[in-house]
Amino acid sequence: MTRYFAGKLGEALVAIWGVVTIVFFVTRFLGDPVALLLPVGASPEQMQALTAELGLDQPIWRQYLTFLAQALTGNFGQSFQFGRPAIGVVLERMPATIQLALTAIALGVLIGGTAGAIAAMRRGSVAEFVVMTLALLGQATPVFWLGIMLILLFAVDLGWLPTGGYGSPANLVLPALTLAVFVSASIARLFRSSMLDVLKEDYVRTARAKGLMPATVFTWHVARNALIPVVTMIGILTGELLGGSVVTETVFAWPGVGRLIVQAIETKDFPVIQAGVALIAAIYVATNLIVDLLYALLDPRIKGSA
Amino acid sequence: MAPLLEVRNLTVAFDTAGGTVHAVNDVSYGLNEGETLGIVGESGSGKSVHVLAMCGLIPRPPGRIVAGQVLFQGRDLLTLPERDLRDIRGGQIGFVFQDPMTSLNPVLTVERQLVELIRRHTALDARAARARAIELLEIVRIPDAARRIGQYPHQFSGGMRQRVMIAIGVACRPKLLIADEATTALDVTVQAQILDMVKDLKREFGTTVIWITHDMGVVAGIADTIQVMYGGRIMERGPVDAIFADPRSAYSWGLLQSLPTAERRAEGRLHQIPGSPPDLYKPAVGDPFAPRNAFATPRCLTEMPPLRQVEGSVPGHLVAAWYDLPAALKARRETVA
Ligand SMILES: Nc1ncnc2c1ncn2[C@@H]1O[C@H](COP(=O)(O)OP(=O)(O)OP(=O)(O)O)[C@@H](O)[C@H]1O
Ligand code: SF4
Ligand SMILES: [Mg+2]
């Protein structure tokens, strides 16, 4: 068990290193940030001076080694735009992203879990048809379009909620709902199909042959087993949303990590891009580790084999 | 004395995309208290479906009970409200299913799977139920029961898992134990141990047993009565000795012929019943086995013979046959000679 997770941890570190390295080299192809940072008509001397100051005159391998050495200590350099440590700029945006991600996941699990369970238990009913149609639509609808439609309806037409921004719970409703639609649609579909598989299992027949109450059969024999793949999906979705939902954050002017990174790409703020991507990779890998751990807790057969 | 279980004209069908499967057709029989009934027949003969249907355990849809009554201690299980049926299942009727790997929940401990059953049907509290569960594992001879009870099914060997399954079947001292291919997947030694254990349990608790298998050899060792099924019908039924000594259905005869006796094993040949199982999508007009039966008469193909007492055999030896098998066999021997 411990060795299993030590191995996973090693894999995780290699993955983060790989992502960070790729991003380092890709950002170098974005173009020269110096021209963007200086006012129009700056002299060649000024440009050279800034290039040297940012360390961009060094050969690329040296830049890379310096970058790696500093990154190991959590130092990604000073943000070109803000003139502060890049990692600080990114971390500041985390609370907003975490708030949005966790609200969306919680809503999605609640709605999607209930809908999926109803669809599976009421096989062939109108309820199943409605749930499955909505879920299919929910998965297929582009997030930006849904976001804009929600803004038009609830903010512009009805005036119930703000169009965007950050601070009060009212600001959170529409962006969280937008993301929750996709999350709950995915969970509803997976939970339903996984329950339908489990309902065919012999051990469910055994549970019924034991005369157990329907609620016991459902909770301990059907849902308990059907949940295993769903947990994996929740973990993956959480990892993705914690990395910042670029589109939603942009549509709703939500000051999260996703939007920050897009801005950093536009302004060629290399240190912020690198710090942001490194953090996202770390979060993603960490959620995956947690999912593996949960998986082993939910399915005793894994523990036995590892 | 009224029988413990009386099945009357049980008929079960499945409505599938390919048509209606006539899985069980007009099955009637009685089972006395303390009796062990062995049900034999090839795969697809309706053995499992008919016992599952009795207790409301077939999926509906696609399953459908077309007709019949199943009287258990005088009450018709087929019309009983689901609530009352739940009280009977696991309590007065215990089940042991084939393949304990898939029939036990892989993510719950054996303890949980036993205790939830015991607490459902008795007034025992959690501690007493656990003690009872350990006792049950000891009864089915699982060594080190107090420790092993906390383990998961995958941590047990196939034979041990089957014992757990049997412990579940007998946990609430059922009046009727239904074992469906309970030893089929096990090797011969383990199979023999389990059969011995079931015989002990019967002696101790007086349990009535329905033992389903497609192995005539297993049935010989455990049953009082044999019931041979084919195409969802009873072909022949009677005391073990009578069936083995004097089979009257060509199908039972074929099954007995395919038993590996010492002599046949030595010769390295096994009799296989030629032909393929019946097409259950078409309701049989005549005897479902007739197309594979070398002794079939024209009447067999067009008219299903009723299950009748065999003339000149012991009472309770019933067969569904238009022809006289002993006479036909004798005639065949003479032509060969
Ligand atoms: N859920 C189902 N849907 C459709 N047909 C079914 C279903 N369950 C059983 N059947 C059909 O009912 C018939 C009888 O099956 P049953 O399981 O009773 O056979 P069996 O005698 O127990 O065979 P085996 O020795 O393989 O266990 C088979 O033809 C089977 O295909
Ligand atoms: S009824 Fe006819 S076909 Fe069927 S077993 Fe008897 S003789 Fe054979
Ligand atoms: Mg069967």
Image: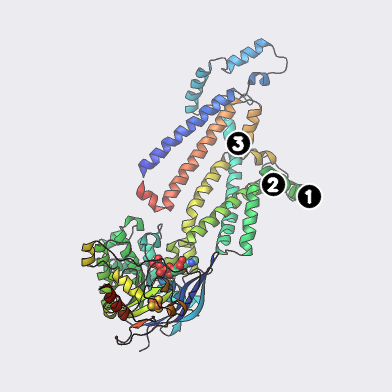
Q: Position of residue B36 (x, y in %)?
A: 31, 77
For residue A146, the mark is 2
User: Which quarter of the picture shows residue A50?
Assistant: top right
Between disc 1 and disc 3, whose residue precedes?
Answer: 1
Quadrant location of residue B48?
Answer: bottom left
Residue A209 visible in the current orientation? no
Q: Chain of mark 3?
A: A
> Which residue position holds label 3?
A257
SS at mark 3?
helix
Query: In this orientation, which residue lies closer to the viewer: A234 or B303?
Result: B303
The residue closer to the viewer here, A88 or A133, is: A133
Label 1 element class: helix
Q: Nearer the viewer, residue B305 or B143?
A: B305
Above or below residue A184? Residue B76 is below
Q: Which residue is mark 1?
A: A157
Say which residue appears at 30% left-offset and 87% top-offset: B312
Tell me which image quadrant ligand 2 sits in: bottom left
Where in the figure is residue B196, as x and y percent of width and height?
A: 25, 70
Quadrant (top left, top right, bottom left, bottom right) of the C terminus of chain B? bottom left
Question: Are the numbered discs 1 and 3 placed on the same chain, yes or no?
Answer: yes
Nearer to us in this view, B7 or A267: B7
What amino acid does circle 3 point to? Val
Q: Amino acid at mark 2?
A: Leu
| Category of crowding for the residue at label 1, using alpha-carbon neighbours closer than 10 angstroms: few (below 14), some (14–19), many (at least 20) | few
Assign the N terminus of chain B to one quadrant of the image. Answer: bottom left
User: If you read the primary sequence from the N terminus, does the residue marked by circle 2 or circle 1 appear first?
Assistant: 2
